[in-house]
Amino acid sequence: MLRYSLSLLFLFVIALPVNAQAPVSKSFFNGVAIGGQDTVAYFSPASRQSGQSVEGDKSFASQWLGAIWYFANAADRDKFAANPAAYTPEFNGHCANALSLGEGLIKTNGQTWQFFGDQLFLFYAPRGLTRWQDGNVEAYLATARQNWLRLSAP
């Protein structure tokens, strides 16, 4: 029995790279991306002005990149489904600050965020966002992108 279980485990492990894709910041238990926040809503003028994220509803869900994405309404879900790359946060929602510090792929809950230019970035905590607001965004971004390429490669 043990030999059979080990054989199945071996087959599972070697099959993983076949489905490899850039990781998404998602819950380990239910696979929901970015803490269930509506990623399309960040792009609305109301959210940008208030700085508040919008919680999604599981009634309006879409799957992409191996994660479940929640939306506040059907219109946002449909916008995302039509062009998910346009609404996906940089680094698939992982903490931009952690990547810029070489700390790895740290999940976020989608509540601490900001646009730099036209790009949406999520942060694990407000302290990381404050660091990025100090004027060195280009340097932080360059390091974060290098680390993302290294860590997200299949």
Image (cartoon, grey):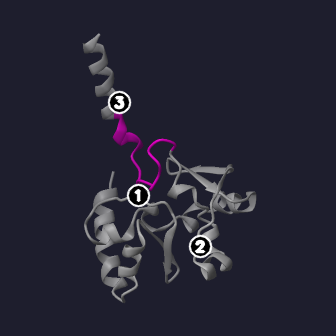
Which quarter of the figure is the N terminus placed in?
top left
Q: Which label is found at residue 12?
A: 3
How far is the residue under mark 2 from the one under mark 3? 41 Å
Q: Please check the rendered image and state whether residue 106 is part of the magenta-colored stretch, yes or no.
A: no
Q: Which mark is residue 107?
A: 1
Residue farthest toward the bottom in the current orientation of the protein: 135
In front of the other: label 2 or label 1? 2
Q: Do residues under tags 2 and 1 come within 8 Å of each other at their CB atoms? A: no
What is the three-letter code of the residue carrying label 1? Lys
Residue in the picture at 41% in, 58% down: 107
Q: Residue at x 38, y 70 (%)?
A: 96
Q: In this figure, which residue is indicated by the disc labeled 2?
A: 52
Disc 1 element: loop
Q: For the magenta stretch, what is the residue range?
A: 15-30
Label 2 – label 1 distance at C-alpha: 19 Å
Q: As shown in the figure, which amino acid type bears the numbered disc 3?
A: Phe
Asked if the magenta segment contains residue 19, the reply would be yes
Task: Classify residue 50 by image quadrant.
Answer: bottom right
SS for dot 3 = helix
The image shows residue 66, relative to residue 78, as above or below, that is above
**Viewed as shown, does residue 42 lie left or right of 97?**
right
User: How many numbered discs, if any?
Assistant: 3
Q: Residues within 10 Å of mark 1 (few under 14, many from 20)?
A: many
Q: Earlier in the sequence, mark 2 or mark 1?
A: 2
Task: Choose mark 3 or mark 1, whichever is in front.
Answer: 1
Return the residue nearer the eye: 40 or 30: 30
Q: Quarter-wise, where is residue 91 in the image?
A: bottom left
The overriding secondary structure of the stretch rendered in magenta is loop
> Closer to the camera, 23 or 114?
114
Would you place residue 115 above or below residue 149 in this image? below
